[in-house]
Amino acid sequence: MLPPPKLYEFRGELRYTIYIFLLLLLAELLISYNSYREFISKPFYFTNAYVTDSYMKHKKGYSYIVLKLKSDDGLEFFTTTSKKKSFKDSKVRLEIFPNKSITFYEYMSSFYVKSKIKSIIKEPDDLKSSFVDKIYSEHNESKISSFFSAIFLATPLDKEVRKQVSKLGVSHLIALSGLHLGLLWIAIYTVLLYPYKFLQQRYFPYRYMRFDLGVVILLSLGYYLYFVDYPPSLLRAYFMLLFSWLALIVGIELLSFEFILSVVMFLLILIPKLLFSIAFWLSVFGVFYIFLILEYNKKSNYRLLSLVLLPLGVYLLIQPVVHTIFTTTTIYQLLSPILSLLFTPFYIVSILLHIIGLGDLFDSAIGYLLHLKMEEIDVKTPIWFLILYIYLSYKAIKYERYFYILVGTAILYNLINIIILLTKCIF
């Protein structure tokens, strides 16, 4: 059988594509920078914004509410208010007061700004809010409810839950990404497969099942992406899924690093703000290391690859990158590969249980993990080491010896962290 054609068949095609991408990205950033300059020059600015998170904070005997908002014009920012009202599931009309202390990076990601709330627009009939309420109604503890609401609907995690999942090294399981989208694809495909075959045999045997089911599933997942408000990691995953499906339909090589790069370039042109999203780049690194492991383990046993090499390999390889931003380290993070494997059946079963009103079946196990006491240390990857590590990762694309050097470096990095942690626990 002939191998599928490559995405970039001729020499130089990829290079010129990158040049065009950089020019387009530069143009997009210049446009965004001009918008930023206009924004910080305004003495005040009126906007409508949806409250994505709100929580009480206490400081020097004074309490106030911190709001995380996403405005209708795409800005994401924090503000505070002394109004003792519930802002859950609401839209607010507010006057914000930009200033020059807001940097361009903050403008493109998220920033703090002073404001005055002019009015609160409640949305009690919002469909997402009703799903969140249903999830909370099936659990007795708010932390567990927050956990399930986050993995199903991308709602903000409770602050204590966020710290705990970070200590367990499973933040990637909470943030909606390619794993969740892949599981949803499998679930929808399984539900539609047999009814489609039945109808196809009787009414349209000439139809191409892969195409028809793919269109229906992609439309369903596209609505889900819109429904949960486009989390960066899920957005990357959706377009990678979309382009993967198109590649399969037209017969282009799928498992290639050029494919990852092309999807990333497309997304950055489409949404330049992703350039400043930590969640987006961590998800890109995760997919890159999955492809890297697959590239050098093509002849490995499928079960060995899926049950051991992929979960363990991705965990080891991504740690130096993750610890550049998130420094918390505990001994329980070694359970991350096992928890990642268990999460696959758990996620699908949990969705079904919540649909039939039995969502609390796993509450004792989830509650145990969320209340587990853990000794922790802070480990931050030095910038010089990160640059070296990324260089090794890049060279590993073409050279197998660099792949094994990269793996050895990752193992050594993780071992040093474990020794430091164990030393602290003992002494």
Image (cartoon, rainbow, N blue to C red):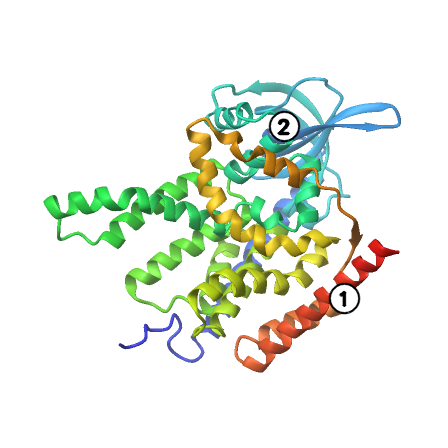
Quick one: SS at disc 1?
helix
N-term-proximal mark, 2 vs 1:
2
**Residue at coordinates 72% horizontally, 59% vertically from top-left?**
324
**Residue at coordinates 33% horizontally, 58% vertically from top-left?**
246
Of 226 and 305, the residue lying toward us:
305
Residue 277, can we see it? no
The three-letter amino acid code for the residue at tag 2 is: Ser
Residue 116's spot in the image, x, y percent?
71, 24
With respect to residue 148, does 234 lie above or below?
A: below
Of 225 and 181, the residue lying toward us:
181
Q: Quadrant of residue 81?
A: top right
**Outermost residue toward the left in this view:** 202
Q: Report the side of 409 relative to 227 (left or right).
A: right
Residue 324, can we see it? yes
Q: In the rendered image, which residue does mark 2 sit on?
A: 142
With respect to residue 109, does 408 lie above or below?
A: below
Q: In the picture, which quadrant includes the C terminus?
A: bottom right
Residue 391's spot in the image, x, y percent?
64, 73
**Residue at coordinates 36% horizontally, 47% vertically from top-left?**
218
Quick one: SS at disc 2?
helix
Q: Quadrant of residue 371?
A: top right
Q: Assess disc 2: are there few (<14), some (14-19) or many (≥20) residues with their C-alpha within 10 Å of its C-alpha.
A: few
Residue 37's spot in the image, x, y percent?
67, 46
Q: Quadrant of residue 252?
A: bottom left
Q: In 3D space, how far apart are the residues under numbered discs 2 and 1 (Cα atoms)?
A: 37 Å
The three-letter amino acid code for the residue at tag 1 is: Ile
Q: In the rendered image, which residue does mark 1 sit on?
A: 416
Residue 277's spot in the image, x, y percent?
61, 51
Q: Report the side of 413 relative to 298 (left or right).
A: right
